[in-house]
Amino acid sequence: MSSVKQEVILWLNSVVIGLNLCPFAGRPTGENRVHFQLSDSSTEEGVLADLMAEMERLDQTPVAELETTLLIIPNRLQDFFDYTQFLVWAQSQLKRHGWQGVYQLASFHPNYCFAGADPEDDENLTNRSPYPIIHIIREASLAKAIEYFEGVEEIPERNKACVEALSVAQKKLLFPYLFGG
């Protein structure tokens, strides 16, 4: 397994699941139903083709075998603005290919910054990953998970409070790629 995938798996287990930022992530991860796909493409067109291929993989694979995919993009979209522009393009392709309402794209990036937040705000840590990542979520699975989870609307505020409460040492341990470690 590549070191890039290993870093992403560590981030998923220690940050996303470890801090319980996504209460729905633990089960499919524990059941080995999360696919980690590395996009080696050096062009945005190639990354988009990789993204489309992963949605086709999800179309062809039963949810009992494969719940979700993380498309990891280590060679492109390092600039957060470029990444957000790419997401607009990717969303339009979902609609074009009839996947709107079937899949949802969640975004993670080393320089993630929520609208209205300052880049230095701790709340951005909830979506800061070691590499640009597009998480392809099955909307039917998400709807089912939400149905059984109370307080879904409180998740963003709870996550913000969680990362803001981390000490500097904890942040350096959990996000070494942000602190030169």
Image (tube, rainbow, N blue to C red):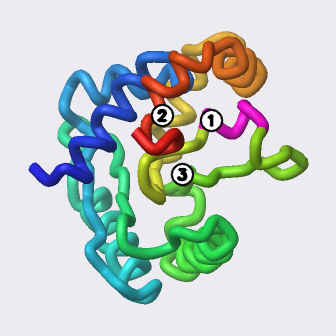
- For the residues bearing labels 2 and 1, Cβ distance under 8 angstroms: yes
Give the image quarter of residue 52.
bottom left
The residues colored magenta run: 121-126
Q: Earlier in the sequence, mark 2 or mark 3?
A: 3
Instruction: Please name the residue that numbered disc 1 is placed on.
Output: 125
Q: Secondary structure at mark 3?
A: loop
Instruction: Please name the residue that numbered disc 2 is placed on.
Output: 175
Q: Where is residue 84? Give x, y as percent.
A: 66, 68
Residue 6 seen in the current view: yes
Q: Quadrant of the C terminus?
A: top left
Q: Is residue 148 above or below residue 33?
A: above
Instruction: Please name the residue that numbered disc 3 is placed on.
Output: 110
Q: In the drawing, does residue 125 fall left or right of residue 130?
A: right
The reply to whether the magenta stretch includes residue 125 is yes
Identify the residue shown where x is 55% and y is 15%. Answer: 148
Q: Is residue 6 above or below residue 152?
A: below
Three-letter code for the amino acid on which mark 3 is drawn: Pro
Crowding at dot 2, Cα within 10 Å, few <14 / some 14-19 / many 20+, comes out as: many
Residue 95 seen in the current view: no
Q: Main secondary structure of the magenta part?
A: helix
Q: Where is residue 28? Give x, y as percent.
A: 31, 29
Q: Where is residue 64? Give x, y as percent.
A: 23, 36
Identify the residue shown where x is 54% and y is 79%. Answer: 93
Q: State how far apart marks 2 and 1 are (Cα).
A: 8 Å
Three-letter code for the amino acid on which mark 2 is drawn: Phe
Give the image quarter of residue 117.
top right
- For the residues bearing labels 2 and 3, Cβ distance under 8 angstroms: no
Q: Earlier in the sequence, mark 2 or mark 1?
A: 1
Identify the residue shown where x is 69% and y is 39%. Answer: 124
